[in-house]
Amino acid sequence: MPVLHRYTNLAATIHLLQTRQITLLNPATWDDRNDAYFMAEYKRHKKAETVLALCFTAQNETYHHWRVFSHGTDGVRLEFDREPLVAAFKSQPDVGVRCRVRHAKRMAVKQTRLEAIKARFCADCGSKKYPAMPRAQNAR
């Protein structure tokens, strides 16, 4: 079964295991300013009061994953079965799921703002609203 990885810290992992919930985060607090910028543009375009999100990857681990997503020495890589995780998110009435995100550098995007948002959020697998804490499924 295909898997998705979530790089995080020990405190977030303990919270997930104790509550069986995954906490979505405010992208404005993300280290990756490119991602934060496009999430802010998406929020502005949708006129949303709040946009919360989490990143998962199906890729092999890299230094970037550990450095950006699991600060410090208490880094943890969680592995989720992809289909049950996506199904759990989709089962939440106000949660959107992006199955794939094509990363584009802010300065390299030479399109209108709306086209830039579409370039960043290219695959929509669900609704377009984002609440706080959906339930986790099959955390290993």
Image (tube, rainbow, N blue to C red):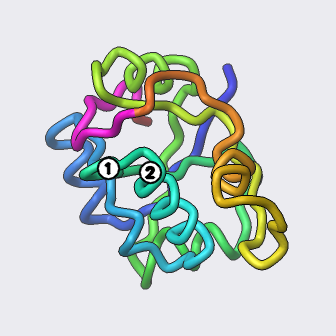
> Where's the C terminus, which quadrant?
top left
Q: Is residue 78 above or below residue 2?
A: below
Q: Which residue is mark 1?
A: 24
Which residue position is annotated with label 2? 54
The type of residue carrying mark 2 is: Leu
Q: Which residues are magenta?
A: 129-138
| Disc ID at residue 120 | none
Where in the figure is residue 38, as x and y percent of width and height?
57, 63
Q: Amino acid at mark 1?
A: Leu
Q: Nearer the viewer, residue 108 or 58?
A: 108
Query: Is 51 in the magenta?
Result: no
Disc 1 to disc 2: CB gap under 8 Å:
yes
Residue 62 image-quadrant placement: bottom right
Q: How many numbered discs sit on the rendered protein?
A: 2
61 sits to left or right of 125? right
Q: Compared to 75, does 5 lie above or below?
A: above
Question: Mark 2, residues whose alpha carbon is within 10 Å: few (<14), some, or many (≥20)?
Answer: few
State the image quarter where residue 118 is shown: top right
Secondary structure found at label 2: loop
Let me know if residue 137 is in the magenta part: yes
